[in-house]
């Protein structure tokens, strides 16, 4: 979502870096560019003015203390990075658990903000950490909110307390209160209360939220806000803060193409931390909000920390260790390994999300948006249509085998040829890396890049004498 902001920041800094020794006028120009970029991203004016004033003051102070232009550029970059982290709330805060369980989390926000979806995500997140959450369906207003929560609860194996059908029937305060009693009696250690929103701020909504708050005495009230509503987010959050009050913010729909102003305005205006980020409709599209990682993304440095965490989760320890050992021992990277990696990558989510976390992603916005997700599915289908022997040793793939694979995967023979050729090229590249050379074109996470378009002609070596891949790798490597 921060692509446009990120590309503006990136270009401001690259022009700053290319300038040699910096003058006060350069600082003023950079500040003007930053100001413009933030305003265009819908950041609240007061936040922009404070932010830019801080950058200007600190930059002008540091400039004379540094001799070289590149040191100056880096120092200003560091100042902006620190200021961004600060307006995003400083450091990440976690949920405060109650001394006497259950810990009660109440969700508040406008209708459609994503509360019910978030209730499920939070429940799953905490259940995975060994907690025993109970979901309470106190949104008795929005059509189907109760059923939606029940379906989410069932899909993640978390019980839902829903004594009323909703759709305008039942007393939400009573449901919330009895939900807490039920959780206590059944020893759940966490209760997540979903509440009703309205399309806009109104008195009824606030009164109901306040009554629920007073009935359940929550440990955390989380204000859930759709990041796509831009400037409105500030007004809405202020109204909720003055009305029901809240302890933390959850930004939803960060996957959308909003300009990101909400994220940058809310923490500094409400003085409440952004605690979680929701980045899609699926249950796993959710994470703790890390101000430093977000600042890093905005500045075009990507979010390598999150990427690494997700990769660790997706690539289970055993297969990574196996692959590493294989690589170290000089064995060939086979199509079987490649398939395993493709499968693990699918677990990490969409390719555009993965690519979006890489440094410089802002500059690749178009390519990332246009990435054809089904390419991975098609590639997987081709590899899955091969026999284990073919996957281990693609050199056995003669014409008739290739025709069979094409038929089995519903692709053309030329697609099979393409994959095999590109794979052989990547395999060769890996061998060079192992032998100490550093060829260009290695993909992220050590995956071979699979560029689209016609593959370069691959010179097929004459068939190896050995049928043993390990031996053959040694033969090929020499
Ligand atoms: P509620 O009225 O606050 O309970 O909102 P819901 O949880 O029903 O969410 C409203 C809509 O937004 C639903 O269609 C959700 O699938 C969708 N939604 C929720 N969170 C996200 C998100 O992070 N990204 C996207 N793209 N959609 C979301």
Image (cartoon, rainbow, N blue to C red):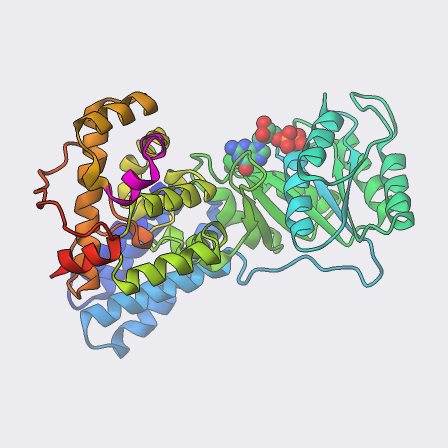
Residue at left offset 47%, top offset 49%: 314
- Mark count: 0
Please state the horizontal and vertical placement of residue 411, each as a whole percent of the image. Answer: 28, 23
In the image shown, does 126 or 62 lie closer to the viewer? 126
* Vertical side of 292 occupied by 240: above or below: above
In this view of the protein, which residue sits in the foreground, 195 or 432?
Answer: 432
Range of the magenta residues? 381-393
Task: State whether residue 175 is above or below residue 168.
Answer: below
Q: Residue at x 16, y 54 (%)?
A: 440
Which part of the image, by quadrant, shows the C terminus? bottom left
Chief secondary structure of the magenta span?
A: helix
The percent position of residue 334, horizontal first and vertical second, equals 29, 47
Horizontal relation, residue 444 to residue 99: left or right:
left
Tell me if I can see residue 245 in this picture.
yes
Task: Indicate left or right for 404 with 144 as reference.
Answer: left
Say which of 310 and 278 sits in front: 310
Find out whether residue 329 is within the magenta segment.
Answer: no
- Does the magenta portion include 382? yes
- In this picture, residue 406 sits left or right of residue 172: left
State the image coordinates of residue 33 (x, y, percent, origin top left): 30, 50
Residue depicted at x 69% and y 42%: 240
Quarter of the image where the N terminus is located: top left
Residue 362 drawn at (x, y percent): 31, 45
């Amino acid at each position: 979502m921060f692509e446009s902001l990120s590309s503006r920041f990136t270009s401001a800094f690259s022009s700053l870096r290319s300038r040699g020794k910096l003058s006060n006028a350069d600082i003023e120009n950079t500040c003007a560019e930053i100001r413009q970029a933030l305003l265009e991203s819908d950041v609240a004016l007061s936040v922009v003015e404070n932010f830019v004033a801080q950058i200007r003051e600190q930059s002008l102070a540091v400039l004379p203390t540094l001799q070289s232009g590149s040191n100056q550029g880096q120092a200003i970059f560091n100042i902006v990075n620190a200021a961004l982290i600060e307006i995003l709330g400083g450091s990440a805060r976690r949920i405060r658990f109650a001394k006497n369980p259950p810990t009660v989390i109440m969700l508040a926000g406008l209708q459609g903000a994503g509360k019910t979806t978030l209730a499920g995500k939070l429940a799953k997140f905490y259940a995975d950490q060994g907690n025993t959450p109970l979901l309470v369906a106190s949104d008795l207003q929005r059509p189907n909110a109760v059923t939606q929560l029940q379906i989410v609860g069932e899909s993640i194996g978390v019980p839902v307390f829903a004594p009323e059908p909703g759709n305008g029937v039942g007393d939400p305060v009573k449901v919330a209160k009895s939900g807490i009693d039920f959780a206590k009696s059944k020893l759940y250690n966490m209760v997540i209360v979903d509440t009703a929103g309205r399309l806009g701020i109104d008195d009824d909504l606030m009164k109901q939220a306040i009554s629920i708050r007073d009935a359940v005495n929550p440990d955390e009230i989380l204000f859930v806000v759709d990041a796509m509503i831009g400037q409105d987010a500030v007004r809405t959050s202020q109204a909720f803060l003055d009305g029901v009050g809240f302890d933390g913010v959850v930004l939803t729909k960060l996957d959308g193409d909003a300009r990101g102003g909400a994220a940058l305005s809310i923490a500094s205006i409400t003085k409440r931390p952004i605690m979680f980020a929701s980045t899609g409709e699926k249950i796993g599209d959710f994470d703790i909000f890390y101000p430093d990682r977000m600042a890093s993304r905005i500045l075009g440095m990507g979010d390598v920390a999150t990427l690494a965490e997700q990769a660790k989760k997706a690539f289970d320890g055993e297969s990574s260790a196996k692959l590493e050992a294989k690589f170290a021992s000089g064995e060939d990277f086979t199509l079987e390994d490649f398939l395993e990696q493709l499968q693990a990558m699918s677990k990490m989510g969409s390719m555009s999300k993965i690519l979006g976390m890489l440094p410089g992603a802002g500059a690749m916005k178009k390519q990332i948006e246009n990435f054809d997700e089904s390419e991975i599915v098609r590639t997987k289908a081709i590899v899955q249509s091969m026999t284990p022997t073919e996957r281990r040793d693609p050199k056995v793939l003669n014409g008739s085998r290739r025709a069979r694979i094409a038929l089995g995967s519903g692709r053309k023979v030329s697609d099979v040829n393409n994959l095999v050729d590109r794979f052989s090229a990547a395999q060769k590249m890996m061998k060079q890396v192992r032998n100490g050379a550093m060829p260009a074109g290695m993909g992220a996470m050590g995956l071979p890049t699979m560029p689209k378009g016609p593959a370069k002609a691959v010179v097929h070596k004459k068939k190896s004498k050995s049928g043993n891949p390990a031996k053959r790798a040694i033969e090929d490597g020499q």
